[in-house]
Amino acid sequence: MAIDYKSHPSELVTSGVRSQVRPKVGIKELRDAIPAHCFKPSYTTSLWYLFRDCALTATGMAIAYKFIPQLEPFWLRCIVWALWGYVEGLFFVGLWILGHEAGHSAFSPSDTLNNTVGFILHSFMFTPYFSWRSSHRRHHIYANNLAKDHNYVPPQREEYSSTLGIDINRLEELTEDAPIVTLLRILLQQVIGFPWYLLTNITASDTSLPKKKSSSILGNSHFAPYGSLFRPDEANVILLSDIGLAAMAYVLYLVSCQIGPAMTALLYIQPYMWINHWIVAITYLHHTHPDLPKYQDDDWTFLKGATATVDREFGFVGKYLFHGIIEFHVIHHLFSRIPFYYGEEATKAIIPLLGNEYHSDKGRAFIPGLWEAFTKCQWVEPDASRSQPGDGTLWYKGGPSPPPEYSMRMKGFYQLFNLRSILRTGHYGITHAKLPHKMEVAKTEKVSN
């Protein structure tokens, strides 16, 4: 049976209502409050943004190729290349986000055009379009469901204590990491987080897969047509995604033969690395905040999960280059087929209905939120002061970062570098703390989609 990309997630799983709002608000009430035209993507508007972003990207590359190599002295040329890479990376991200829009069928009314644009743009950015589209769809259906979500599923008390090698009853004695450790962890996530997610499906729940978790090297990756992430009827389009990446790799090889590997790296790899940073930072901070709950499967509903995200602020870049993806993410989780250029209008329409159930953190800078997330949002457990006992709502707790996840729900990278043992002398106030060890993986369950 073909995967249903057209139905709203609330039609596929338990929809739910926000009972804290009076009167109770459900998907129908929210949909009715949004002007009808917000649900209708425009060919003209979307193609204009595509043309604009392609022009910015191509112009930036042409200027850099022609003029930067002529700059002297060498140190000035290095500085300009670095600054150019940052700015060009912003243009790259804008194109990636348009591919993201296409994956949600929000780029145009035509599925053929959507998938064509999404496939080309994401292949250009070394993102397997149809593979990402499949797992990203499940993230939107099961957002903030601890058993079924695909992105940034935090550990609970037992798993967290196990990965730190700390007694489960002594977690409250821990303090956050030394600043240098936090900084290194942030750098690690921002540099390789996205490609490592594509390779290993890190941050996903074991029970989020449509098949049994694979024990092979790439069996849980976005590149395996018959891997654990995909249903058998998806194999053809997953393979097509791989072909798209291979074609892009060949294009880069041909380009490097003409202009040289170093120039190719400066013009493409440098802004590509900024994509890794921004995609990870944006998605991580949308779903990681001290005021955002997570839910056990039995207590979760689509509406609870979709509203447990936060809108942030990134100024001119966020609004005009990143297409409002940072500023208007709550509405995107509620109705992902609303085009980004209607995000602000739709958000203003639902805020009065959601009241305190609408989460926004626009009063401070975006990037410092990374530091807060890494220090205040490490694991989750129930909080009697914020929810009723036994209701399945869990809240973030602070503490030291667990070892990096090197495979899905598998942690222990610090065992290779022993970084924490070097830097934590006297830090935790617990002298008998063990080095992190590999956690026992829970038995996977089949999840229907």
Image: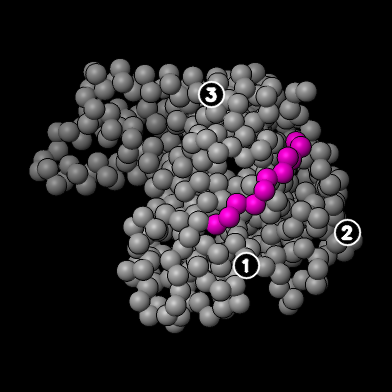
Viewed as shown, does residue 11 lie left or right of 145? right
Q: Residue at x 50, y 68 (%)?
A: 165
Mark 3 surroundings: few (<14), some (14-19) or many (≥20) residues within 10 A: many
SS assignment at label 3? helix
Residue under pointer 2: 24
Q: Which circle's residue, 1 or 3, is located before the other in the chain?
A: 1
Q: Is residue 446 in the magenta section?
A: yes
* Residue 267 vertical placement versus 436 (above, below): above
Question: In 3D space, how far apart are the residues under numbered discs 1 and 3 (Cα atoms)?
Answer: 38 Å
The CA distance from mark 2 to mark 1 is: 32 Å
Viewer can see residue 317: no
Report the residue at 38% width, 23% height from top.
249
Return the x and y of residue 239 as percentages of the image width and height: 55, 21
**Nearer mark to the viewer, of 1 and 3:** 1
User: Closest to the observer: 134 or 278?
Assistant: 134
Seen from this angle, which residue lies furthest right?
Answer: 23
Please give the range of residues in magenta: 439-449
Residue 241 numbered mark, or none = 3
Quarter that holds the N terminus: top right
Q: Percent from the top left, x then y, of residue 22? A: 87, 64
Residue at (49% x, 36% y) in the render: 217
Task: Give the left or right position of residue 370, taking residue 47 as reference.
Answer: left
Name the amino acid, label 2: Lys
Secondary structure beneath dot 2 equals loop
- For label 1, the crowd category at 10 Å Cα-Cα, with few meaning under 14, some 14 to 19 and many 20 or more, is some
Name the N-terminal-most of marks 2 and 1: 2
Q: Nearer the viewer, mark 3 or mark 2?
A: 3
Which amino acid lies under the numbered mark 3 shown in the image of this protein? Ser
Residue under label 1, please give it. 157
Q: Nearer the viewer, mark 2 or mark 1?
A: 1
